[in-house]
């Protein structure tokens, strides 16, 4: 066996392992996928909304929170991070209209990051629970209510929800809509093994006491929502996710915005891994599964990219040379004989993994069907599987470079 | 908590079972290809034995023609099988059985070359031999590209010349002593090389038109 075959087989084994892990978790818990406990105690809750130049969306976000069916929601604290658009005046108008419920705040100077704005808002919270919603996200009416019951368990530190894409007009939004559903479902599955690794910005609620204990959001981290989750689980608290609880968010509608967001996520992931490297193979699921999973993701992504680039480079050189020689000797550049359709065992492994992944993705999309949106098209699904996912490793390189160089900002 | 941990081991066991089953199926699949090649080889070997038997009967004009025809058929058959063998060798990933099959074929083809030369000498036949000696599984990119183009050129040459040439591709790096001896005789130190009628050694790529001039 040559080295490339060994690498392919190792990748196949790892891919099979994680696929089977998710499939087994699903089958073991399929009756509980959509379960959420009804709350016994009505905890007081404040929602903090960090806002920077969101004049187009902030009103709808505040309105979505006002429409929430959870009676324990006492305050909606909207923190403007010195926006240069009309955001703050919209927030103030709401505060005037709902003085008992809405608090309009503005940071002294632009913090330039969501974590800074969120921490600033958290200072004004005196309720048992503290929640956060991005200023371009819209929780469903019952979303918060469906999350609260988990706090009846004392060990619960945070509860997150299913994040979905609000607008699905552009192709890149459609692809992200698929991705977000896959992420939400797999996060729910990870919840069954106490391994939820992120409480995303669009909607997350924390027990205030625990939020204070962990020191709020790490303002030096690009993905404060990952960092705080690791911080919470590293202290032995649980993070939960009710799948029926939904929040819709605005996904980047241009490639550039999407690319920038992913780089930020990756750098934040690296920062978090670096911060928690000492818990590797220690401290419950964080050290024994979540952190190794992140490390594995990075190693496989980067190493796979190197191997693939090497193979493409080699094949390209051969093709360029062959074409040049063929032209020189006036022989055919490409013939039918050049296409070797004889299958091999690696192709079988690859096809099986692809087929299982496709079935898994289709199952997720069927599970999380939304009546108000059109069904996912086959083209979107295929491009998601063949193109979109293959871009992930490419972004790892840029992210790693920026991380090592320290060249990143919000 | 124990139940939660167990699922990781269950997934591992399931992966192991599926992986081993896949490996078993893969090896069986590759073995079936090797079996197919071995069957072709056995037939070719019988064919060659038959030619050798005919060789012993040389002297009669009738047998000479018969021998030349049989040799040509044999060469064409082995050439077709060589193309198939290359495809199967490329797709073999787990076992190395195809390498052995390749070596046996290379020996057979070396024998065929020697036999073709004998027939030409003894029977004064008018067919030409084109022997292509290449490097099997070469890592050298330039060599790989050159060999890709050589095989296309020679395929085209065979299509143009048909029964007038006996085309014999042989891997020259499979440690076959008889072939090594022939390489020494023709002072071949670098591969790939094309030998036309045991006179012309071509080491650089030439077009089909240029090659055809060697037969004029």
Image (cartoon, coloured by chain):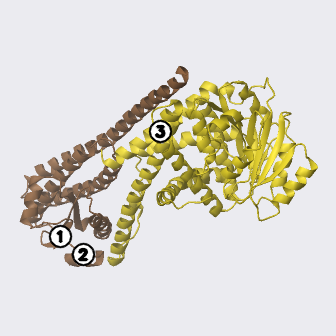
Chain A, hue in figure: yellow
> Height in image: A392 above or below A323?
above
Query: How dense is the environment of label 2, judged by Cα within 10 Å: few (below 14), some, or many (20 and up)?
Result: some
Subunit that carries the residue with mark 1? B
Chain on which label 3 sits: A
Image chain in brown: B
Mark 3 to mark 1 CA distance (whole Å): 61 Å
- Residue ranking furthest to the top: B2
Identify the residue under disc 1. Answer: B196
Measuring 54% from the left and 46% from the top, which residue is drawn there?
A: A272
Disc assigned to residue A223: none
Chain of the residue displaying label 2 = B
Rendering coords of residue B4 (x, y %): 55, 24
Residue A133 in view in this figure: no
In the rendered image, the residue lying farthest to the right is A97
Secondary structure category for the residue under label 3: helix
Mark 2 lies on residue: B211
């Amino acid at each position: 066996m040559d080295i490339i075959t060994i690498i392919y087989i190792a990748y196949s084994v790892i891919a099979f392992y994680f696929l089977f892990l998710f499939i087994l978790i699903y089958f073991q818990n399929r009756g509980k996928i959509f379960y959420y406990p009804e709350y016994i105690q009505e905890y007081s809750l404040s929602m903090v909304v960090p806002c920077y130049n969101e004049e187009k969306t902030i009103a709808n976000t505040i309105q979505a929170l006002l429409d929430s069916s959870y009676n324990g929601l006492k305050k909606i604290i909207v923190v403007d991070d010195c926006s240069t658009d009309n955001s703050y005046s919209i927030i103030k108008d709401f505060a005037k209209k709902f003085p008992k419920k809405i608090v309009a705040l503005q940071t002294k100077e632009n913090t330039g990051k969501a974590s800074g704005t969120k921490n600033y808002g958290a200072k004004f919270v005196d309720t048992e629970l503290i929640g956060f919603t991005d200023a371009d996200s819209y929780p469903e009416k019952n979303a918060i209510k469906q999350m609260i019951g988990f706090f009846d368990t004392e060990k619960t530190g945070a509860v997150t929800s299913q994040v979905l894409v609000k607008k699905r007009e552009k192709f890149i939004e459609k692809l992200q809509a698929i991705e977000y559903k896959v992420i939400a479902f797999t996060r729910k599955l990870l919840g069954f093994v106490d391994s939820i690794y992120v409480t995303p910005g669009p909607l997350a609620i924390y027990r205030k006491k625990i939020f204070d204990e962990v020191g709020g959001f790490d303002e030096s981290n690009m993905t404060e929502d990952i960092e705080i989750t690791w911080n919470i689980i590293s202290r032995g608290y649980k993070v939960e996710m009710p799948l029926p609880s939904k929040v819709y968010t605005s996904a980047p509608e241009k490639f550039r915005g999407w690319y920038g967001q992913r780089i930020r996520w990756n750098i934040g992931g690296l920062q978090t891994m670096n911060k928690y490297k000492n818990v590797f193979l220690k401290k419950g699921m964080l050290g024994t599964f979540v952190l190794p999973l992140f490390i594995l993701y990075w190693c496989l992504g980067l190493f796979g990219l190197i191997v693939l680039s090497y193979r493409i480079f080699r094949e390209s050189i051969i093709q360029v040379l062959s074409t040049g020689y063929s032209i020189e000797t006036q022989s055919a550049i490409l013939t039918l004989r050049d296409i070797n359709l004889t299958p091999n065992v690696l192709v079988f492994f690859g096809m099986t993994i692809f087929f299982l992944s496709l079935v898994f993705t289709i199952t997720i999309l069927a599970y999380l069907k939304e009546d108000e949106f059109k069904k996912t098209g086959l083209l979107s699904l295929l491009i998601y599987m063949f193109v979109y996912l293959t871009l992930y490793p490419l972004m790892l390189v840029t992210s790693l470079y920026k991380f090592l160089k320290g060249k990143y900002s919000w | 908590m124990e139940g939660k941990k167990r699922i990781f081991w269950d997934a591992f066991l399931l992966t192991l079972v599926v992986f081993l089953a896949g490996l078993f199926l893969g090896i069986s699949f590759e073995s079936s290809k090797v079996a197919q090649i071995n069957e072709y080889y056995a037939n070719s070997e019988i064919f060659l034995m038959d030619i050798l038997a005919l060789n012993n009967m040389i002297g009669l004009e009738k047998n000479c023609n018969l021998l030349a025809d049989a040799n040509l058929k044999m060469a064409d058959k082995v050439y077709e099988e060589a193309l198939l063998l290359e495809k199967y060798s490329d797709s073999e990933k787990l076992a190395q059985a195809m390498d052995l099959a390749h070596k046996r074929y290379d020996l057979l083809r070396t024998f065929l070359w020697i036999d073709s030369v004998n027939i030409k000498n003894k029977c004064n036949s008018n067919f030409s031999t084109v022997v292509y000696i290449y490097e099997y599984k070469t890592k050298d990119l330039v060599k790989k590209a050159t060999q890709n183009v050589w095989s296309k050129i020679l395929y085209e040459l065979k299509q143009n010349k048909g029964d007038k040439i006996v085309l014999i591709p042989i891997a020259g790096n499979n440690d076959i002593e008889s072939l090594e001896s022939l390489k020494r005789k023709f002072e071949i130190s670098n591969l790939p090389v094309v030998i036309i009628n045991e006179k012309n050694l071509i080491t650089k790529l030439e077009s089909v038109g240029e090659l055809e001039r060697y037969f004029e």
